[in-house]
Image: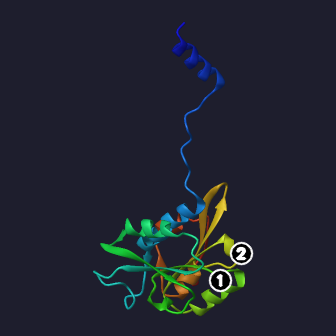
Amino acid sequence: MTARVILLLLLLLLGVAAPAVAQPTEDAVKAAFIPKFARYVQWPAQVHPGPREPVQLCVIGEDQFGNLIDRAAASEQVDGRTVAVRRLADAAGSEACHLAFVRGGNAQETRQMLFAMRGQPVLTITDSRAGATRGMIHFTVAGGRVRFFIDQAEAQAHGLSISSRLLALALGVRQRRT
């Protein structure tokens, strides 16, 4: 046997595997989801972006995404409109947002930011790192996968309508008020 054949057999016997494909991080998955949510939300006519205006996606408070959300938004189109990312330290100025990922330094800060946005037609998004405080869409990890809950009642109270296609993907839905 040649040295090459022996080496190949040895590698096979030792179980040398091909390099594993890198799995996206939890934050990368969330960053990819967030701009896509805009496709499935209907805003009131008075705040709906015009045909040439970008959809405003705001990251309010702590930014856990860095450029991940910028890259995801750059590749997204919503009815022919681009998605622009803005970063805000707090809820001041959030009335110009269409979607807002909200995360304070702790659960109380997140709750205060959401409270400051009450009544605004902004789709609020939170994650389980903020504790029990929830926006209209709330990310969690279940079975090792990033999933989300939807509070349709809260969205409706803010004048937003969420598509049944997105509701069908949710881990759970708090139904609309009648």
Secondary structure category for the residue under label 1: helix
Residue 52 x/y as whole percent: 28, 81
Q: Where is 49 relative to 39, above or below?
A: below
In which quadrant is the N terminus drawn? top right
Residue in view at x 42 percent, y 83 percent: 43
Q: Residue 53 versus residue 88: which sits nearer the camera? A: 88
Residue at mark 2:
131
Residue in view at x 64 percent, y 66 percent: 140
Query: Crowdedness of circle 2 by 10 Å Cα count: few (<14), some, many (20+)?
Result: few
Q: Residue furthest front?
A: 3
Residue in view at x 54 percent, y 69 percent: 65
- Amino acid residing under circle 2: Gly
Residue 98 x/y as whole percent: 45, 82
Mark 2 and mark 1 in contact? Answer it, CB < 8 Å. yes
**Mark 2 → mark 1, Cα distance in angstroms:** 9 Å
14 on left or right of 89: right
The disc placed on residue 110 is 1
- Amino acid residing under circle 1: Thr
